């Protein structure tokens, strides 16, 4: 039995089915692959060609290596092409469907059907017991199974039906669960900072967050979002500051150089040339904004340049699981086999996907972990 008809669950199901196993997938929601359908703006960023273990967060950074090495982006892409699904590569190795994420869900369900897997949606699942076999309580009666694969995901996006079911079952069987929190999530600002930045809501610019992630940042009515911010949110912890390079292609002395080249241009004009106008207006000191750059000493220009290269902000928090793309943390990897995803203390019980303490970067990495971990469990269950 596979509990959860998402990415990891469906992969585990048809992988086991291909091995001649009798497989039942139970999904409490009304459709399979609900989160797949909304991913990537409806086009599903289904993997990333740059997948590597160092692009995943976990208390044990080595745990993901086994599964990722045995089921790669090329393996999943081969299945996509077998089903004649058109795809394209965006930036940074991200692969998307040309048409719709629905094609990925249809592909997974077709593979399940071909492997003899039974998928039931809209079935409520209660307590799981274990004696000689597993007994799973459902709203349609008890079901018995030799193996159970927990693939219900994490706590992110509860409106899509996300619950902590896998974590609850893990705890029931005595498995350790690490601290969980929202990941790949927008950051919020305290009231004083928000009063300054709210007029920029909707403005986007390319930045480097935390000296690590270079992608777009978006000002919102609550704080910051965009790919670079979602990436850094998985590292940032409440109470910490955040350093943002607003002009990654320029050095700190760029204003001095531009002043010498165009001494009659105002400071506001010079900044308008390198960042969106509303952002430039926010960061230009009011007492210097309209003055010709040639009249300004080098020192304040150097200081302004340095501040733009290392904008210091102190977010107040995140937008929580409602807006988080993933859950950080989960079932402790020390309790699982890295090769099979089977729990070490409960034979026949497996945990895969987001419920495990392995979380990828933004950009298809979490789907690749779902495919890889699901495949590992499906090969062993």
Image (cartoon, rainbow, N blue to C red):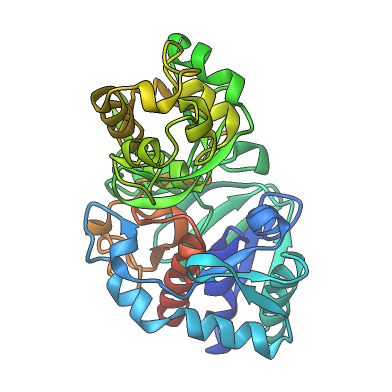
User: With respect to residue 370, does 123 lie above or below?
Assistant: above
Q: Position of residue 30 (x, y in %)?
A: 76, 51
Q: Is residue 64 visible?
A: no
363 relative position to 58: left or right: right
Question: Quadrant of residue 245 in the image?
Answer: top left
User: With respect to residue 175, does 132 lie above or below?
Assistant: below
Question: Quadrant of residue 317 in the image?
Answer: top left
Q: Position of residue 68 (x, y in %)?
A: 37, 75
Q: How many marks?
A: 0
Depth order, front residue of 204/106: 204
User: From the image, which quarter does the N terminus lie in?
Assistant: bottom right
Q: Is residue 80 visible?
A: yes
User: With respect to residue 155, does 85 lie above or below?
Assistant: below
Residue sitting at 53 percent across and 23 percent down? 281
290 relative position to 342: left or right: right
Q: Position of residue 187 (x, y in %)?
A: 46, 30
Depth order, front residue of 346/291: 291
Residue sitting at 38 percent across and 27 percent down? 294
User: From the image, which quarter does the C terminus lie in?
Assistant: bottom left
Depth order, front residue of 78/209: 209
Residue sitting at 63 percent across and 65 percent down? 25
Q: Position of residue 139 (x, y in %)?
A: 69, 47
């Amino acid at each position: 039995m596979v509990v959860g008809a998402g990415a990891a669950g469906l992969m585990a199901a048809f992988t086991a089915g291909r091995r001649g196993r009798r497989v039942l997938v139970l999904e409490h929601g009304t459709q399979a692959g609900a989160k797949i359908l909304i991913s990537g703006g409806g086009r599903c960023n289904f993997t990333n060609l740059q997948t590597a273990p160092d692009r995943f967060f976990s208390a044990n950074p080595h745990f993901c290596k086994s599964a990722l090495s045995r089921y790669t982006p090329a393996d999943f892409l081969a299945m996509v092409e077998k089903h004649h699904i058109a795809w394209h590569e965006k930036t940074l190795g991200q692969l998307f469907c040309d048409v719709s994420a629905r094609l990925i869900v249809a592909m997974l369900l077709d593979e399940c059907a071909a492997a003899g897997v039974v998928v039931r949606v809209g079935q409520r699942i209660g307590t799981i017991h274990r004696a000689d076999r597993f007994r799973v309580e459902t709203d349609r009666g008890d079901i018995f199974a030799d193996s159970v694969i927990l693939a219900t995901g994490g706590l992110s996006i509860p409106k899509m039906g996300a619950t902590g079911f896998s974590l609850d079952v893990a705890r029931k069987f005595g498995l350790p669960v690490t601290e969980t929190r929202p990941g790949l999530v927008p950051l919020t600002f305290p009231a004083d900072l928000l009063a300054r930045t709210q007029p920029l809501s909707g403005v986007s610019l390319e930045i480097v967050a935390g000296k690590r992630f270079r992608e777009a940042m978006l000002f919102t009515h609550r704080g910051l979002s965009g790919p670079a911010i979602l990436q850094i949110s998985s590292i940032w912890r409440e109470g910490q500051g955040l350093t943002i390079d607003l002009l990654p292609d320029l050095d700190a002395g760029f204003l001095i150089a531009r002043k010498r080249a165009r001494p009659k241009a105002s400071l506001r004009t010079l900044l308008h040339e390198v960042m969106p106008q509303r952002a430039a207006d926010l960061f230009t000191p009011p007492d210097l904004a309209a003055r010709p750059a040639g009249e300004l000493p080098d020192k304040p220009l150097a200081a302004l340049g340095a501040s733009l290269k290392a904008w210091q902000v102190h977010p107040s928090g995140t937008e929580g699981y409602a807006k988080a793309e993933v859950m950080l943390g989960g079932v402790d990897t020390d309790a699982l086999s890295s090769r099979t995803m089977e729990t070490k203390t409960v034979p026949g019980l497996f945990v895969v996907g987001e419920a495990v303490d392995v979380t990828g970067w933004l950009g298809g990495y979490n789907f690749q972990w779902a495919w890889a971990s699901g495949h590992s469990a499906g090969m062993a269950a």
